[in-house]
Amino acid sequence: MTITTPGVSPVTVTSGITLSVDGVDITVPKGTLVIRAAEQLGVEIPRFCDHPLLAPVAACRMCLVEIEGQPKPQPACAVTVAEGMKVRTQVTSELAEQAQQGVMEFLLINHPLDCPVCDKGGECPLQNQALSHGRAESRFTGVKRTFPKPINVSAQILLDRERCVSCARCTRFADEIAGDPFIDLLERGAKQQVGTSSDQPFDSYFSGNTVQICPVGALTSAKYRFRSRPFDLISTPTVCEHCASGCGLRTDVRRSTVLRRLAWDEPAVNEEWNCDKGRFAFGYAAEGRLTHPMVRDESGELVVASWPEAMSIAAAGLRRAGSRTAVLTGGRLTLEDAYSYSKFARSVLGTDDVDFRSRPSSAEEIEFLAALVAGKPVGPTYAELESAPVVVLAGLDAEDESPMVFLRLRKGARLTGVKVFTVAPFASAGVAKVNGRVLTAVPGAEAAVLDSLADEVSGARDENRLEAARLLREPGAVLLVGERLAQSPGALSAAARVAKATGAALGWVPRRAGERGALDAGAIAGLLPGGRPITSDAARREAAAVWGVDPASLPGSPGRDLGAVVAAVNADTKAIAAAAKPSDVVRSVQALLIGGVEANDLADPAAFVAALDAVPFLVSLEQRHSEVTARADVVLPVAAVAEKAGTFLDWEGRPREFAQVFREALTLSDSRVLAMLAAELDASFGRGDIASVRGELASFGSWHGDRAQAPGHAPPEAPSVGSDEVVLATWRQLLDRGLLQEGDPFLGATARAGVARISAARATLLAVATGEAVTISTATGSITLPALVTTMPDDVVWLPANSDGSNPRVTLGAGHGDIVRISGGVV
Amino acid sequence: MALTEQTRADAVDLAGRYPQSRSALLPMLHLVQSAEGTVTADGIALCADVIGLTTAEVAAVATFYTMYKRHKVGRVHVGVCTNTLCAVLGGDAIWSAVSERLGVGHDEVSADGAVSLERIECQAACTNAPVMTANWEFLDDMDVPRALEVIAKLQAGEEVHSTRGPRIGTFEEVERALAGFPDGLAGEGRNDDKMLAGLTYAKAHGMSAPPGPAASPLAAGAASKTEA
Amino acid sequence: MALTPILTAHWDEPDSHTIGGYRRHGGYDMVPVSLGVHPDEVIALVKESGLRGRGGAGFPTGMKWGFVPQNDGKPHYLVVNADESEPGACKDIPLMLANPHSLVEGCIHAAYAIRANHAFIYIRGEVPHAVRRVTAAVAEAYAAGFLGKDILGSGFDLDIVVHSGAGAYICGEETALLDSLEGRRGQPRLKPPFPAVAGLYASPTVINNVETIANIPTIIRNGADWFKQFGTEKSPGFKLFAVSGHVERPGIYEASLGTTMRELLEYAGGVRAGHELKFWIPGGSSVPMLLPEHLDTPLTYEDMAGLGTMLGTGTPMVFDETTSVVRAISRWMHFYKHESCGKCTPCREGTFWLEQMLERFEAGTAIEADIETVDEICKQIAGRSFCALGDAAATPYAPALKYFREEFLAGTHTSADELFDPVAATVFAGAAAR
């Protein structure tokens, strides 16, 4: 529903166009639409097709107003203001009022009277405006238009055609905003209706927005259909936990159950949109949750325990391990919770073996983040993307990994001519939709391609590279890097060089919601909160002051990251097995404290699981059962986002605070559990409640001390690839097998089908065509998928990560940039 | 018939005739209809593929225009104009008679598959009302007996000539001509008495338009430009 | 007044549609003439002639051409609206059948004037023979060097694409035609921007009717003064009047604008024998009907406006006393409902409602209050729809009610077919009786 809230106080604009609306003068910027000018005066002109983020069409005719000098009433949604214009709306013009009543009567002749069972009833612009701008009685006594009900335009979106008023907001959204014109207006005249073609459902990552902007109940979601009435819902403004886009949401609850989530109006971030994952993937928090603490009994089984018992066992184990504990966290964490882990590791356990990157990562990435991202002010921003002369993406597929970045790039490409380039092996669907051009990079060669942009001349051989290099030097240019660059040695170093050489703003767009917050909270080896280097005495003093501990008690040298921790555990295991007297081998990692880490997200899931099995003591703070909880000595259930307040830092670094949806929730946040654990360990920690954690974070302030230098790793040599081998390119699509999407089958059904992308030459070589099977294999295993012939380098194959039928990290033991074998058919 | 490599090649040809390939969509839908006798999902997919649209976008266009058929029409697709003027002058009577004879209504095909019937709107031949069409060729100045005679011939597969155009070809042939692939029949047909009514009257009554000047007033300008 | 065969002068020659037949009477002789002067001179001449658009709206053609911005760096386009579909209009199709080269030649002059190197002739799809004739004429013109690159060594290039529509009356609306020509649903566009500034492919575009363009070669050949001796000051020139309906000799009558309907009826042999004129419509179903008392009003843009109607397409439909006005209006309502594009609410829903209401009058099942309800529905459409189709749908009822209220009152108890024997109205009624 997008009725602009009236009552916004009139804005005083010194230079602009002055017109009068219902006799009241107002000055607005040139180009303003009459309907927007009226809103500023608090005059709400009824409307259906109008939407501030869609191009005007003046189709529904509901907003007709009288404009002096015009013989006919004019659509306020499509007429731009003119100096001296005199507009009379329904408030003062009988002509306008009659015109609007006439249009309303027309809209209602074919609208069913099923408001009592319609999802939209109670929040329906048609219902509301029929009351405010319609006649009390209809004169229509004929036969209404009917359709068989309803039709699925996708697994998730249903359409009741007889309710549709042909405002075309949904089809215009699909075409203009999402770039997925899989729904369109079909038929003509009174038979006109929204529909899909028979062979292609409305599988758009953004389809749910059409339900929200539908001004009637024509579009509904399978998730929410017939679940509730809007007046029975309790609404809370929230922020999405699924990615780093930072979308503002509204979470609607009835009887302690989340029934739906809507995109909320956040002009600086998500405007009025969100993606379907953010909208529909919340079932994970309702079903299959961990509800009670669990500990191992004598037989080694996990059994339910009381909080005091579980705390006591956990504390004992951690006390034994002390600073030989490593703290590993994942992308679901809020800023506050990540901070608590960061603090707990350093001030309670005295370890710097901390890492929030529960995904393939590198030491180079830590250097990069420490130098250029951690604790830095907000920016580049969404608004900067929209007005940039160029945005170069590297190791980032925006549509899959940060949908709002994608929508903003598309908006910029459509409306303000933003040019988009992507350092990638091919143009994905999302790249095409932003008119993006590919700076072709075989996985592993990203650094070399980026370096060619740093030096304008060396890129001269490739027209696209030359243009990108030139545009990057213009004011406002932006370079965005994704988490995948960490898998390409030298690439982040090269990105830093490009930014420095060109002056382009550099943005880091991680995939998960919690990553930027965790970085700034210092949940990573080597960094204290705010980007403070742990090696800095001043930094440690500042941290110790906030934490109320002795600076000398804090670790003074960088600890190990996740990969190193896992390697150390497994190396010790090996050493123990080989040792004549195993007790002589002292493990360097005695305990793991883990929150939010999924094995399948990691570079080497098998090694991680082996480490879980081997580590002497394992504490898991988790929402749902996982590989980690299955192996933990103590499992402590923690709150999902709806059960706590918190903050995500979006990719811009913008704090996105949200409130607790379930104020009566009994679950505890990670912070509260860590605080309890600290108390059990007799450590000074605080209560871990949201207010005190935020207070501590605020007292840190900005870091003005030294920072690490940006990494200067050189690009690697290109690997040699055999004739039946290709380089694997892989990343996760928006909808995949992520745990936070569990419990949402309608959403899952709209995920993109798995394919193996190969070049035409490779397809010829393998004698396969699009749709025919291709098998990718390593010594570990093989994956067979239908081929999709794509314009891309011949020595590359792309597979979706962590999808149904394709999880290269697990099945192949291979990731982005690794060499795999390829063959036609099923092997 | 079916979509072939030639259909695709023709579609690509059409796309190349316009500054922007999407402009070829209407002719292209005529083309796929000429290949399959109707607009099929495959035809829509072919257009979408050649132009670079989604199939929904093509379906949106295909369902907007009444000449694109959702199911196979007869060998001959017959239209009877029942817009006001034709209806009043006999179109309604012709419609009833033809519909009864064929045993079909609007947008239906006779049991033998020979003839499909459509109530059509004004064909821009009002001087020749009541008007029928066969595969869109004019059958002017109809009455009930002649309409039934034509229908009988069409059902029997006999040759029927349009009043102002060529012999009636197949639906697919006409669709191909509409798609922009000439069938060589432009020279067929004649200007009828309705088209010549005014000229005939003028000649009979010695009426003519006054002659113009000896030379175009622009010619002087053209000459001076040439000299310059 | 008298008939003035100009465009139709040689239609009785069997090869009138060929380049040979056209050139025999001086066709294409003017191409080097106009290409030899500055394009602005061509625009000036057409402006001076006072030629007004023959598609229905009557907008001055030269002025329309003058709106096209020059030196704007964008391609310009000429689009010929050959989507003749207005009920009653049947002049452009005969012209394209009989003399397509006059259209092709007109395109050359017009395109040169507006600096377009690309012209499109959008012909309604339901008339394949017109498509064939124009396509053949274009091919002949290419072969003769009147189209293509560097026409007659002038340096001017022009390509013409003949484009078939696919069955949608709305595509006669110029912006809907542009969307259709761009391969979209033929729904009208918001104005501004106007096509002269942002038309086809968002580039400056002139859209002219077939008859308008076919007039251009005569103006180039004979000049503005010659042209202005026909017609009136405000409606100069001549017109293809297509007279249809209950007349003895329906057909195309080319005469000066300002000719009266009484004169046209005389040429057409009068209302069919034994019958008398009931009502007539000067230019398509979308303009208000007139009565016998209006027969002596000159058929000009201004005089028809004076009667509260419009010259429209200048193709009068004649109905005699056997015709049920209710049935006539009802059928037109069906037409507008069938052809409404669906974009805007008043037209889409209003025509849906009107059709049902008029069917009640026709069936004799209306109630008296329906008379006012229909009038109000029309008023709720007129001036509030997106484009003129809605206005057109709202037009026929009010004058019909004004002149023939008793027939609508009768529709509350008696069907139209009972009141007016449909057989009596047919052209073959006499034959059946005999």
Image (cartoon, coloured by chain):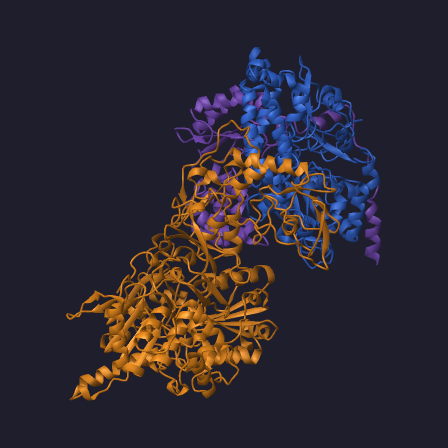
Chain colours: A orange, B purple, C blue
For the residue pair C75 and C23, the one nearer the viewer reads as C75
Total residue callouts: 0
In percent of the image, x 75 and y 22: which residue is there? C295
In percent of the image, x 72 and y 60: which residue is there? A14
User: Which residue is farthest top?
Assistant: C434
State whether residue C263 appears in this view.
Answer: yes
x and y, in percent, of residue A529 in the image: 45, 78
**Left or right of A682, for residue B102:** right
Measured along the vertical axis of the image, is residue A762 above or below residue B184? below
x and y, in percent, of residue B165 in the image: 57, 33
Measured along the vertical axis of the image, is residue A237 above or below residue A356? above
- Find residue C69 and report its image quarter: bottom right
Q: Quadrant of the C terminus of chain B?
A: bottom right
For the residue pair A226 and A467, the one nearer the viewer reads as A226
Measured along the vertical axis of the image, is residue A561 above or below residue A79? below
x and y, in percent, of residue A186 in the image: 49, 43
x and y, in percent, of residue A376 in the image: 51, 76
- Find residue A523 and report its image quarter: bottom left
**Left or right of A499, for residue A23:** right
**Left or right of A617, for residue B17:** right
For the residue pair C54 and A427, the one nearer the viewer reads as A427
Measured along the vertical axis of the image, is residue A252 above or below residue A72? below
